[in-house]
């Protein structure tokens, strides 16, 4: 989001002076001041949406993110954040369809937004869309190759498809990035056990 500091104050003052000297100049300067105000309000809606979400007010968060999105003044990075965050709020309400739609919009708006791929992968996994989840994890890990939790979570999609060899490899990679992580170590034992004795073979 473009921030221009206190420029809107100086611009507004200039507009008052110009009103007496050159009336035709004032509207464009006032429009710039209003753009700044609107941009700040949209940013405030994202911040207050985060606060509402943190205290469990998912509906309040959704309303604030929607206001930010509807403002039409956000740059693409902040617009993608607003969509992604609203998707998280929908997800926490249990509405995965709306969550996925917002994650889709976040990615369409900013195709390099790693967090949106992460969230969409998790949602797709819960819907049993494992191949699609894998594609999102692949893109995520291309954007952020040192994200241990990305490899760890991708292992569950591989396991759901019966590819315990891939699941083991992903958790081993996660442990390379985060050595000694107990959760990862415990899961690695589980995947190795499943690889040695696949559930369908029991």
Image (cartoon, helix red, strand yellow):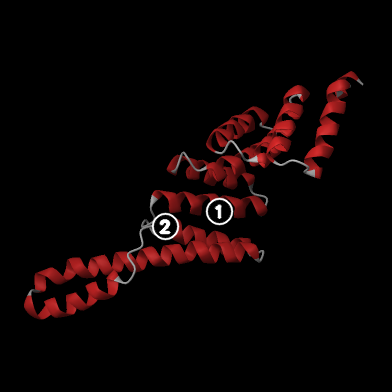
Q: Quadrant of residue 192?
A: top right
Mark yes or no: residue 135 visible: yes
Residue drawn at point x = 58 percent, y = 43 percent: 100
In the displayed image of the protein, which residue is found farthest to the left? Answer: 21
The front one of 134 and 126 is 134
According to the picture, the residue beneath numbered tag 2 turns out to be 70
Residue highlighted by disc 1: 85
What is the distance, in whole Å, between disc 1 and disc 2 at their CAs?
14 Å
The numbered disc on residue 137 is: none
In the picture, which quadrant includes the N terminus? bottom left
Neighbourhood count class around disc 1 (C-alpha, 10 Å): few under 14, some 14–19, many 20 upward: many
Q: Is residue 162 visible?
A: no
Work out whether residue 171 or residue 73 is closer to the camera in this orientation and state it: 171
Tell me the SS state at disc 2: helix
Q: Is residue 179 left or right of residue 115?
A: right
Identify the residue at horizontal 50%, vertical 61% (top origin): 46
Q: Residue at x 47, y 49 (%)?
A: 80
Q: Is residue 128 above or below residue 76?
A: above
Residue 29 lies, in percent from the top left, at 20, 68
Q: Provide residue 37's location: percent of width, then percent of height.
A: 35, 69
Asked if residue 75 lies left or right of residue 130, the reply is: left
Residue 113 screen position, x and y as percent: 50, 43
Dividing the picture into quadrants, the one containing residue 165 is: top right
Spot the residue most to the right.
Answer: 202
Compared with residue 88, is residue 181 higher up or lower down, i.e. above or below? above
- Mark nearest the camera among 1 and 2 is 1
Which of disc 2 and disc 1 is earlier in sequence? 2
Q: Residues within 10 Å of mark 2 (few under 14, many from 20)?
A: few
Q: Position of residue 133 (x, y in %)?
A: 63, 33
Q: Are marks 1 and 2 in contact (CB under 8 Å)?
A: no
The reply, left or right, for residue 136 in relation to residue 157 is: left
């Amino acid at each position: 989001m473009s921030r221009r500091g206190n420029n809107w104050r100086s611009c507004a003052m200039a507009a008052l002076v110009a009103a007496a000297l050159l009336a035709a100049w004032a509207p464009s300067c006032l429009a710039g001041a209003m753009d700044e105000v609107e941009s700040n309000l949209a940013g405030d809606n994202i911040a207050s949406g985060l606060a509402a979400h943190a205290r469990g007010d998912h509906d309040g968060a959704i309303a604030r993110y929607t206001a930010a999105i509807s403002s039409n003044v956000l740059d693409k990075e902040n617009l993608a954040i607003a969509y992604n965050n609203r998707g998280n709020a929908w997800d926490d309400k249990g509405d995965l369809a709306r969550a996925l739609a917002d994650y889709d919009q976040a990615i369409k708006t900013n195709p390099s937004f790693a967090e949106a791929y992460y969230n969409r992968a998790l949602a797709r996994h819960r819907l049993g869309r494992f191949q699609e989840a894998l594609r999102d994890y692949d893109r995520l890990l291309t954007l952020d190759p040192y994200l241990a939790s990305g490899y760890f979570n991708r292992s569950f999609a591989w396991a759901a498809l019966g590819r315990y060899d891939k699941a083991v490899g992903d958790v081993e990679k996660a442990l390379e990035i985060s050595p000694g992580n107990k959760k990862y170590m415990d899961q690695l034992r589980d995947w190795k056990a499943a690889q040695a004795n696949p559930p369908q073979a029991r």
